[in-house]
Amino acid sequence: MLDATEWGIVALSLKVGGVAMLVTLPVAFALAWLLARVRFPGKVVVDAAIHLPLVVPPVVTGWLLLLAFGPNGPIGAWLQDWFGVTVLFRWTGAAIAAGVMALPLMVRAMRISIEAVDRRLENAARTLGAGPWRVFWTLTLPLSTPGVLAGAVLGFARSIGEFGATITFVSNVPGETQTLPLAIYSALQQPGADALVWRLSCVSVGLSLIALIASELLTRRAGRGLHVL
Amino acid sequence: MSFEIDIEKRLGDTQVSLTLEAGDGATVLFGPSGVGKSSILNMVAGLLRPDRGRIAVDGETLFGDGFDVPPDRRKAGYVFQEARLFPHMRVRANLLYGVRGEAERFEDIIGFLGIGRLLDRWPRTLSGGEAQRVAIGRALLSQPRFLLLDEPLSSLDRARREEIMLAIEHVRDVLKLPILMVTHDPEEAERIGNRVVRM
């Protein structure tokens, strides 16, 4: 079984993945809603930009994050000046990298579930006296919830598997930014660490499998139109 | 005048237009499918914007003359062709969705619609006739100033049609709400309508 250090790696991965997913969730939902429901000029460009992390080499995404969050980067300098914090070489930076990489997957899943909400129901609610906000809170949000949760779980799975952008952005610091894939990569560099690679890989596959099954079950639930949570 | 309508709207290749001044009771828009009858109701409800014209109910302008009252302030009780019940809410929550303040006539309305025993059911467990009666109840409980009915009987079998027909007559004769109804069935048009407008 795993020793204390290895459990630490698993715990760190879950923390990074969990925080990445929770912080990205509202952003992804807002973008998904925007793409599903609002017509605006430049929508194609926004849509493409959101999907960039899916196709750009992760090392490029990591480098761009480094530019933005580095001591001279616009966000990095602002964080340093106002809050005296940096995300470089920190688990928070790993969570940012994981969140950015997971964003397109989450937006895609959520957009589909928002588009699947029957506009005719929303129109019926309008005629019953509900303003746009009430329609959103009482219909759009609850009816898209299973799909939104499926997207979130998928994002979580993607986050705990994040490698390229993370290692470029926040390096591979044991106990701070060394999540499962980075630990596996380090172990592969050491002679005689095969058993460790096996153990960590099994945990990695197991976690991903659980997340994917959960996501699939939620998607089916949304597809069946049960909507009752 | 209950309804004063003079509107035009182009929808694809179809030019939808209607000029109508109707008094109390039920006005039926009668005609074949595809001439834009449902679009007229959507425009009166505020769900579709006419290209030009004016819509007024009981003397109050809902559209035109610089007005475009949003659908949630038009106080239209709209019963659609399909019941459109909210699938994640039980019947009771569906009925109460449009209620502002106290549900004054709740007992009355569920009584004459015969839906009292359905209150704790989920919409997916209802028959077509039951769902449509709940939809009528939901529209009436939102304290509408007028009722829009879009082929409310078309998805029902003969026995169920009679139930809904009686409910609509009750609304027309007892609650005395102005009704604008769309149908392609001459028998329905004849029975419900105080006046029939052919489209």
Image (tube, rainbow, N blue to C red):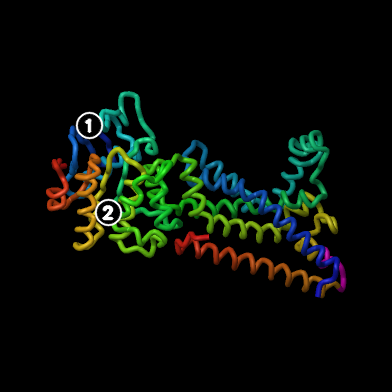
Q: Chain of mark 1?
A: B
Would you name the residue on which mark 1 appears?
A: B4
Numbered mark located on residue A96 in the image: none
Tell which of A199 and B153 is nearer to you.
B153
Residue B36 seen in this snapshot? no
Tell which of B102 and B98 is nearer to you.
B102
* Mark 2, other Cα within 10 Å: few <14 / some 14–19 / many ≥20: some
Residue A183 picture location, percent across and down: 80, 63
Question: Does the CB distance between marks 2 and 1 fall below 8 Å?
Answer: no
Residue at 49% over, 41% down: A133
Tally the numbered discs: 2
Residue at 31% over, 50% down: B108
Residue at 28% over, 39% down: B146
Q: Chain of mark 2?
A: B
Would you name the residue on which mark 2 appears?
A: B112
**Disc 1, SS:** strand
Q: Name the outermost residue toward the top.
A: B65
- Is residue A188 found inside the magenta-colored segment of the image? yes
> Does B105 appear above or below B24?
below
What type is the residue that disc 2 sits on? Phe
Q: Name the outermost residue toward the right.
A: A191
Region in magenta:
A185-192
What type is the residue that disc 1 sits on? Glu
Question: Which quadrant holds residue A207?
Answer: bottom right
